[in-house]
Every structure is written in structure tokens, then in C-alpha cells.
Amino acid sequence: MGRVKVNLTLDADVAETARALGLNMSRLAETAIADASKVERNRLWREQNRAAIEAYTKEVAEDGLPLTRFRSF
């Protein structure tokens, strides 16, 4: 996928420090946004699947892990 230009507003001191250190602010912002997106996507998935997760957790607590009898360790 290609790259797009976006407007981003930063604290002046933060931007000045990053420039002074030679940091690539675009790449840093991209990485931070990608990481935050992943965290939020995972949070939403857990929220949307909470009932199934709780049901499976209850089942394992009551009946143990499926296929346990076939484990060789």
C-alpha cells in the first residue's frame, strides 16, 4: 500500500527535540499509530468475543482441557 500525507500537530518542544536528535518523526508516528491500532483492535476483539471467552474458560475450569487424554507430556 502506498503512503499518504497527513497533518499532525505536535508540541513544539517535542518536535524541536526530535529534529535535534535527527529522528524521523513520520516513521516514529507511523509506528506509534500502528502499535496503538493493534492494541485497540485486540481490545475490541476481546470485548466482542467476551461471552465466548468466558464460556470457554468456564468449560476448561469444569472439564479440563480438551484432548488432555492424548497428551504425551
Image (cartoon, helix red, strand yellow):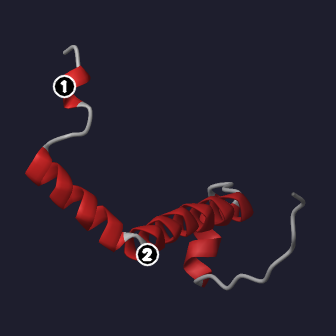
Q: Quadrant of the N terminus?
A: bottom right
Q: Residues within 10 Å of mark 1 (few under 14, many from 20)?
A: few
Q: Is residue 43 left or right of residue 29?
A: left
Q: Circle 2 is placed at which residue position? A: 48
x 16%, y 60%: residue: 58
Name the secondary structure under disc 2.
Answer: helix
> Looking at the picture, how far across and down is residue 38, in whole percent?
54, 62
Q: Is residue 70 left or right of residue 49?
A: left
Task: Say which quarter of the image contains residue 23.
Answer: bottom right
Q: Is residue 15 above or below residue 42?
A: below
Amino acid under label 2?
Gln
Amino acid under label 1?
Arg
Q: Is residue 66 left or right of residue 44?
A: left
x 13%, y 47%: residue: 63
Q: Circle 1 is placed at which residue position? A: 69
x 23%, y 20%: residue: 71
